[in-house]
Amino acid sequence: MKNMLLKDAEERMKKSTEKISEEFSHMRTGRPSPAILEEIKVDYYGVPTPINQLATINVSEDRSLIIRPWEKNMLSHIEKAILASNLGLTPINDGNVVRLNFPIPTTEQREKWVKLSKEIAEKGKIAVRNIRRDVLKEAKEMEKNKEMTEDDLRRFEEELQKLTDKYVEEMDKLFEKKKKEIMEF
């Protein structure tokens, strides 16, 4: 039973880490990345559809994303969706492709992004600690119901703390990686 609790805790902590990693990938950093467009939906004949299902998205060397729709009539729809998305980027429609230019971010902007990244990482750490708290509560309930001895509970707490520390450290690593990426310019 103890192992099941640990396994459950680890799975939940891993999911939290993956969620934070995903949030970081959608964050704007000044560097063009197709991942920034994943959440944007375009009205495709009445159906909200992700841009990457309507077009190819390429990163060009001049700090821009090139969105080449498979149907030319989708250019204006893609342009409108990007404008409505609050990305802070202005799409340029040249009749064949939509271009998103990424200006070099100011130091102030980068510091703001780092602060936002830190907040996201902190949310992840809080989620991991909440998982620890919930699982520990279950274990204490088991000990109370005589399903686990006091010594087993103590060992379980130690193992759970090691697991928690591992995933909190993982969150810190993700944050440091994102911070480095943001401050790279």
Image: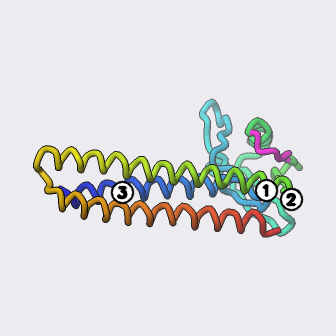
Residue lying at 80% horizontally and 39% vertically, measured from the top left: 83
Residue stretch in magenta: 86-91
Residue 48 locus on image (x, y percent): 61, 36
- What amino acid type is highlighted by mark number 1? Glu
In the image, 35: left or right of 12?
A: right
- Is residue 57 visible in the rendered structure shown here? yes
Of the residues under marks 2 and 3, which one precedes in the sequence? 3
Whether tag 2 and tag 1 are in contact, CB under 8 A, the answer is yes
Circle 1 is placed at which residue position? 111
Give the alpha-carbon distance from disc 2 to disc 1, as whole Å.
6 Å
Circle 3 is placed at which residue position? 11
Give the alpha-carbon distance from disc 2 to disc 3, as whole Å.
38 Å
- What amino acid type is highlighted by mark number 2? Thr
Residue 127 locus on image (x, y percent): 47, 48
Residue lying at 24% horizontally and 50% vertically, measured from the top left: 139
Residue 185 locus on image (x, y percent): 83, 68
